[in-house]
Image (tube, rainbow, N blue to C red):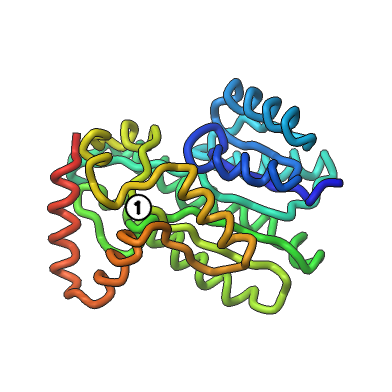
Amino acid sequence: MSAGTAVVTGASSGIGLELARLLARDGYDLVLVARSVDKLDRLGAELAARHGIRARTVGADLASPDAPGAIAETLKQAALQVDVLVNNAGYGTSGPFATTELRTELDLLQVNIIALTHLTKLVLPAMLAAKRGRILNVASTAAFQPGPFMAVYYASKAYVLSFSEALAEELSGTGVTVTTLCPGPVPTGFQARAGVDLKKVVRTPLVMDAAAVARAGYVALMKGKRLVVPGLGNKLLVQSERFAPRRLVTKIARFLQEQVRA
């Protein structure tokens, strides 16, 4: 018997892929969303065969404003009630704001902020009507401070954290929970796309692999926790940023970004 239906964006690799594996293991039917349809189809077939679940794949580029509505229409046509929504899709870019590509950053905002908000808005009413549901929004430890040379990315994750925590409070007592996952550096395809030197990232003590981050996020999601920061080093970093002067935090973030820029 199915545990329910889970929608995972950015499911073709990294944290999204690992979360999909955990959901399938626990009997959730999956709707896997990403740009790479071939990867999604292979993953869906693998998880369906291994765990006896149903896996649907939706090829969608969340940089397109029409993508969330198309995903919701797919769910409607299949008569699916979403029990778990994982807003994992996102990416970054680096460089001085004055010289980075405008189109890339507008697309980043569309994926990291607008699509996440839009898809949550479309899925939430049915969850409230059913008086059950779990939402996991993937932010970052970047959400807790400004990030010179990745200014737009850091700001986008600050939005995800603020939005998710506010929504979690709004939904208190409804049976619907919102969890925000804030990982530190995770070696995935993210770094190459963001223009960050992967070798330098791997050397930092805050790094965790995607599977470990996904496990921490999944446990928190299932417990209905509002916030999870995986890894002791990342927890200490986030706590220290709350007490340090804002200007000092920003200068430290600048120094760290300068060390890892490709």
Q: Secondary structure at mark 1?
A: loop
Above or below — where is 150 with respect to 17?
below
Image spot of residue 247 (x, y percent): 15, 69
Q: Position of residue 160 (x, y in %)?
A: 46, 59
Compared to residue 238, the image places residue 112 above or below, namely: above
How far from the left and from the top, in percent, is residue 188? 39, 35
Q: On the image, numbered disc 1 is attached to which residue?
A: 184
Viewed as shown, does residue 101 lie left or right of 73?
left
Q: Quadrant of residue 144?
A: bottom left
What's under tag 1, amino acid-wise? Gly
Q: Point out residue 166 in the picture as x, y percentages from the top left corner.
A: 52, 72
Q: Is residue 209 above or below residue 224?
A: above
Residue at (26% x, 52% y) in the render: 151
Which quadrant of the figure has residue 219? Answer: bottom right
Quadrant that contains the C terminus: top left
Near-viewer residue (70 or 178): 178
Residue at image position (72%, 31%) is 50
Residue at 55 percent across and 37 percent down: it is 17
Q: Is residue 128 left or right of residue 236?
A: right
The answer to whether residue 9 is visible is yes
